[in-house]
Amino acid sequence: MSSKNAKLLDEMTCDQPCHCGEGYCILKEIILHDAKYKDRLLVQFKLVDKFKLVESTTQQQDVGWTQAWELWVSRGYAIKFAELYDTGLSMNALFNKIIN
């Protein structure tokens, strides 16, 4: 695994129950096992996951994955993601720039 991929996985999983490298992390194991995923796809999954949480909090109900993806696309966030992905922003900065 490249150091870029390792850093990406750490950033993606730091808000998960395993708390960034404090032992075994099932999410990291799944991602490492299925290497067919590209970094860009993984980053977008994580950003939509974060968006789903924000939107669910705003609506005071779980919007679910399907609606989260539909909103992500209909609000133009997928296009913004495509434009900003290779800019070197951290995941949180990328999310904030896309949403705001």
Image (cartoon, rainbow, N blue to C red):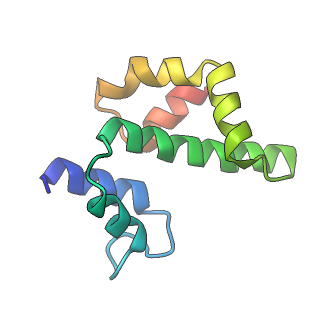
Q: How many labels does the image show?
A: 0
Question: Residue 91's image quarter?
Answer: top left
Work out whether 25 lies above or below 57.
Answer: below
Q: Is residue 46 above or below residue 83?
A: below
Where does residue 26 sit, x and y in percent of width and height? 41, 73
In percent of width and height, residue 53 lies at: 68, 50
- Name the residue at 67% across, 46% down: 65
In the image shown, does 18 or 41 lie closer to the viewer? 41
Q: Which residue lies furthest to the right in this view?
A: 60
User: Which part of the image, by quadrant, shows the C terminus?
Assistant: top right
Quadrant of residue 87 in the image?
A: top left
Judge from the rendering whether residue 88 lies leftward or rightward of residue 50; answer left or right: left
- Residue 95 screen position, x and y as percent: 51, 36
34 left or right, relative to 53: left
Q: Nearer the viewer, residue 8 or 42?
A: 42
| Residue pictured at 74% horizontal, 42% vertical | 55
Quadrant into which the N terminus falls: bottom left
| Image position, residue 86 (x, y; %) | 29, 26
Q: Which residue is drawn at 39% across and 38% down?
A: 41
Q: Residue furthest bottom?
A: 23
State the image quarter where residue 33 is shown: bottom left
